[in-house]
Image: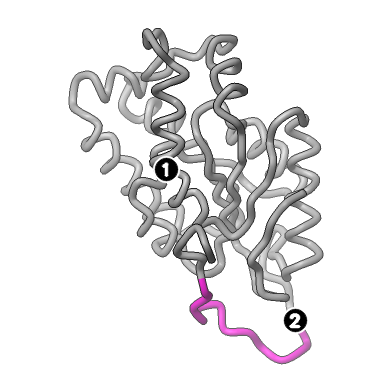
């Protein structure tokens, strides 16, 4: 069952999916975008198209910091575009201030997958991922997930993503959005009730205990 820390109503202009590699951000993101009739932005795909290189090649040649700056620049662009489902790379959350860049009208959702399931998916995946072929993938994944866990917990919504189809996860997210908040689909809707200030700050869960 999902865990949420959402206030009862707030306009949502975009959704950002968080999670480690193979957690399903791209497939769930595309399914959710179809349901909401929004655009979909896969950060890795967009960066690769712009650079003419794979993420693995960018990191190997220019270093991870350069790649993270590319992600940050794309985040700035996305923050100005309503009606988007965003699927950044697994390490995007290493700069948690990017959640604030996207603003209070962005719903963040963490797709939770166990270490063992991540290893299984990585071995079955055909994508040339940065850590593919690592001699001890389970130990590496367990360490990285442990390090990133407090950051992933900053998400507004925590969704179990193991043993479920992308459509089922997208449906759960859509239900949360439609039942817990007013959502712009696909453009701002006229609300005849009291106006809401979209710039009003929201509380984020800033620690695992929150």
Q: Tell me where residue 139 appears, x and y as whole percent.
A: 42, 21
Tell me which numbered mark, 2 or 1, is placed earlier along the sequence: 1
**Across the whole image, how many numbered discs are drawn on residues?**
2
The magenta segment: 191-203
**Distance of label 2 from label 1 (alpha carbons):** 39 Å
Q: Image quarter for residue 90?
A: top left
Residue located at (69% from left, 56% from top): 3
Alpha-carbon neighbours of circle 1 within 10 Å: few (<14), some, or many (≥20)?
A: some
Q: Tell me where residue 119 appears, x and y as whole percent.
A: 54, 18
Predominant SS of the magenta segment: loop
Dot 1: element? helix
* Residue at numbered disc 2: 191
Up/down of 76 relative to 198, above or below: above
Up/down of 203 relative to 155, above or below: below
Residue 89 in sight = no
Residue 90 in sight = yes
Q: Tell me where residue 27 appears, x and y as whole percent.
A: 65, 31
């Amino acid at each position: 069952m999902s865990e949420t820390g959402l206030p009862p109503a707030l306009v949502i202009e975009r959704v950002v999916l968080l999670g480690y590699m193979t957690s399903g951000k791209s497939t769930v993101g595309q399914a959710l975008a179809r349901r909401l009739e929004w655009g979909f932005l896969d950060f890795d795909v967009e960066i690769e198209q712009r650079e003419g290189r794979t993420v693995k090649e960018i990191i190997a040649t220019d270093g991870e910091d350069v790649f993270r700056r590319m992600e940050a620049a794309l985040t700035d662009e996305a923050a100005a575009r309503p009606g988007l489902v965003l699927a950044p790379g697994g390490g995007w959350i290493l700069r948690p201030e990017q959640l604030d860049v996207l603003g209070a009208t962005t719903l963040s959702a963490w797709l939770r997958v166990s270490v063992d399931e991540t290893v299984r998916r990585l071995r079955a995946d055909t994508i040339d991922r940065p850590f593919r072929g690592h001699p001890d993938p389970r130990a590496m994944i367990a360490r990285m997930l442990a390090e990133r866990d407090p950051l992933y917990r900053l998400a507004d919504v925590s969704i179990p993503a193991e043993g479920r189809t992308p459509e089922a996860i997208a449906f759960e997210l859509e239900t949360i959005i439609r039942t817990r908040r007013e959502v712009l689909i696909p453009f701002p809707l006229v609300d005849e009730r009291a106006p809401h200030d979209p710039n009003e700050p929201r509380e984020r869960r800033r620690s695992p205990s929150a």
